[in-house]
Amino acid sequence: MSMKSNDIQEQSFQPKEILLEGIEVVKDEKESKKRVRGIHRPKTNSKALLKSLSLPFALFLILFVLFPILFIVFYAFTDANGFFTFNAFISFFTNTVKLNVLLISVLIGVLNTVLCLLITFPLAYLLANPKINKNYMLVMLFIMPMWINFVLRTGALRDLLTIILSAFGTTTGEHPLFCTMVGMVINYIPFTILPLYSTMLKLDKSQIEAARDLGCNPVKTFTKSIIPQAMPGIVSASMMVFMPTISSYVISDTLSEGKIMLFGNSIYLSFSQSDWNGGSFMSLIMLIIIFIVMFATRKFENAGSERGVSAW
Amino acid sequence: MVKKILSYCYIYLILLFIYLPVFYLIIYSFTAADTLGMWSGFDLKLYADLFTNKETMIALGNTLILAVVASLVSTVIGTLGAIGLFYMKKGLRSFFENVNQIPVVNAEIVIAMSLTVMFVFVGQKIFGGANLFSFWTLLIGHCALAIPFVYLNVKPKLTQMDPALYEAALDLGSTPTKAIHQVIIPQIVPGIFSGLLLSFTLSLDDFIVTAFTRGSGLLSGHSQIETLSTLVQTKIKKGSLPPEMRALTTIIFLVVLTIVVIYSLKVNHDAKKAKSSLAGAHAKKRSSFSKEAR
């Protein structure tokens, strides 16, 4: 065995020696370093070429991601003539209508997130169970609606709801909240399925079994083992639903017949009225909400993973 | 057994729930009645109507042209950006990665509003009151949506790659452009492809950014560019979905379904193959062990 490994070493050394001969072995260390640097010089140049490839990308991000946000901040605190003012700030926080819109948006966002999670959590659990589903196609079918134009789907749902509700003698306009929620849930189920499904695939089955063996009843197994393990998936699924719901426009506008204003509708309204200052201020508020939620969930996610570690 | 039946019931019930509106349209696409829910016998008239309806065809053409151009541009910029950042110093790289993350978490309407405000400002103050809104602003909007996702799809493939490969190619006498083309790109092709696909679907489905940043151009000529999303939205704002849209829904559904079936068959096949090859590897290991034992 040892003989063999020696052979291999000898063989592997041979090409190196040839290489060294090719560039002349230099004994002085400093000189050799210089030489090596000399050999490397074209490489650093070519790395500059590699780096320059990202120039369009970097420019695009600065021009069309960073700058626009600066413009939003600028417009949020100036008036139509470009002078500094707190007008948008004051009119937003003293306007009960706009504040109500924000409150209702957050409430509908929470409601939608909870409903979607309640429906898709068991669904993802079942789909990830190899005893029930081995076919990837079933998972894809749940995601597939995302590739059918969502305005088209929303219009279809509105027409369907109109027919169903007319059988009960009412219209969609009379039940704006119900219709909006049906539309929201149908639209966001595909978004929640994927993150939940992928964490369910990674569930540690032996931990769940151990919990059962150690005397946990099903409820306790669920709350102490399955939920903590699935926490990253739950958090990212909630993020996929909550934020887009608050800022959604088409679903609430179409299905509530314009009776439910969400924050997105409010921003859209200021766009269609060319109210750039008010719209920018609301966008800024939205941006701040997004960063707060991001920050909060990042902490939450860490807590979840820590809990997972402590469970070990 | 009962448990299994119940779980199947649950799965298919939810599936039915999310497809109900689409199925409803598909069924009634095969009849000529204008109002949804009325069946006046089997008829393919709506399909003929769809292809002769100029408005819808223009919107469809615009949507496809925009999606193709936007996804190609985004894929090129995003991929090159990922390669360049990969070889950059850490500080600069993490700065651009953080900026790249903004549109990913940002609400679409905020992206749309911020771009619009900027275009309005630049048009008024720099170009002297010019209206900048055109196909180009629309393209920028769609790229702003898609480029970050292309980057996020390509980057993991780069980190899986051996960073010394590029230098090795240079050592072996390849020119830098050739090294990028023949060594780096082939390593990250799957990431590029999924980035392209994602940006294509993002562009196809978009409503908000399109509504905010569009101007005149493309097939719409001198009037505002209509894509499928904006056209359908203006229609359903006025009343129910136009009948020919039922035929369009059926066609879109069939196209997407075909792609999904082919893709999942491939995934299932690969999973089986991986399993069997794993089993094969185990068998080889076992046989080699037994040889050594001898």
Image (spheres, rainbow, N blue to C red):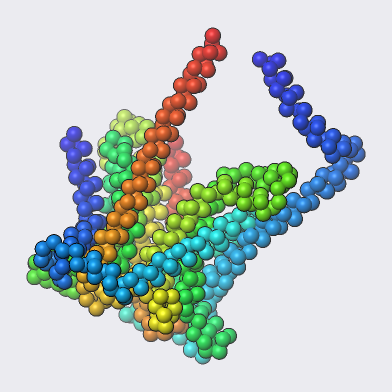
Q: Can residue B32 be seen in this view?
A: yes
Residue A306 placement (x, y as % from top left): 46, 45
Q: Which quadrant of the figure contains the N terminus of chain B? A: top left
In front of the other: A86 or B92: B92
Q: Quadrant of residue A216?
A: top left
Residue A194 placement (x, y as % from top left): 37, 50
Identify the residue at horizontal 45%, vertical 60% (top origin).
B199
Residue A257 placement (x, y as % from top left): 23, 75
* B63 vs A85: above or below: above
Residue A305 placement (x, y as % from top left): 45, 45
Identify the residue at horizontal 18%, vertical 59% (top origin).
B27
Identify the residue at horizontal 71%, vertical 57% (top origin).
A48
Q: Which quadrant of the figure contains the C terminus of chain B? A: top right
Count of numbered badges drawn on the protein: 0
In front of the other: A122 or A151: A151
* B184 vs A253: above or below: above
Identify the residue at horizontal 90%, vertical 36% (top origin).
A27
Q: Is residue A253 visible?
A: no
Query: Going by the image, does A213 lie left or right of A162?
Result: right
Query: Going by the image, does B95 lie left or right of A279?
Result: right
Residue sitting farthest toward the right: A28
In front of the other: A83 or B248: B248
